[in-house]
Image (cartoon, rainbow, N blue to C red):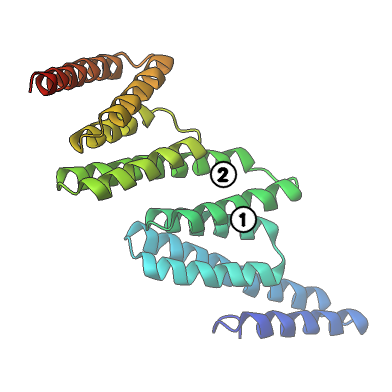
Amino acid sequence: MIDEGDFKDGVKRASQAIEIAKQHNLPEREKIENIALTVQYGKLRHLFDSAQEKCESQKFDEVLNLAHQCLELSEILKDVHWCSEVLSMLGQIKAHQGDYEGGVQDLEKAVSLLQENQLDGVEELQEIIFIVKNNEAVRLHEKANFAAQKGNLEEAIELAQKAYEFQCSVNHKNIQPATLGLLGQLLLAQNRSAEGLKQLQQALDIAQELQAQEAINQLQEMISVFSRKIEDQDIGGEQL
């Protein structure tokens, strides 16, 4: 039954067989226990290995299906180690496919299981979560930049604002100067001068905090150029 995917009833039947053997002190008790464990964990290992193989070939829909079966059997067996392993796999696959929230949720659940049961692997999982969050921060910036290149200013502004908010929420500062710089330029392109310069100055402040000299130079140049343009426009308006 377990081999055919009916995990719940299969494990239940195996447990009943072990219990009967214990109650009647059958000589085959130890053999029955060993067979039950071999079948259960053999299936678990097979599902996990199959999921990893599909992952390597980037067949992610099949990976998710196998991983969910693996998680179901792990939970039925109440095996915390296996549950955390599978949740880690699920989390990384979901994040890779664009389901950031679902991915981080699974990864954080895996961390909680390890912490609650005082098992190793917490630091490794926390590092994976850090990488997933950083990747999402970059992805959102790139999405805003792509919209800007397409000339969709309103969409690009909205995406850049969301990207910056997300970067703040996960304390990912390295890309904040680029995102705020992009947002500032987009606002200036809409003649929202005060807002645009404010974003550029904030980007410069963060770049200086990070001691990112290349970004500092670029932002200082942008602020100087746009400030002169605004001054020229103001002078032209007064002359008219």
Q: In percent of the image, x 26 and y 36: which residue is there? A: 187
**Kind of residue at badge 1:** Ser
In the rendered structure, the answer to whether residue 207 lies left or right of residue 112 reads: left
Q: CA distance from mark 2 to mark 1?
A: 9 Å
Q: Which mark is residue 84?
A: 1
Which quarter of the rendering shows the N terminus? bottom right
Q: Are marks 2 and 1 in contact (CB under 8 Å)?
A: yes
Q: In percent of the image, x 21 and y 45: which residue is there? A: 153
Task: Determine whether 180 is above or below 88 in the image.
Answer: above
Counting the numbered discs, the total is 2
- The image quadrant that residue 22 belongs to is bottom right
Label 2 secondary element:
helix
Task: Determine whether 157 is above or below 234 in the image.
Answer: below
Which quarter of the rendering shows the C terminus? top left
- Residue 188: where, in percent of width, then height? 22, 32
Q: Camera-side residue: 37 or 212?
A: 212
Q: Residue 42: tell me if it is visible.
A: no
- Residue 233: where, in percent of width, then height? 13, 23
Residue designated by label 2: 125
Q: Camera-side residue: 133 or 88?
A: 133
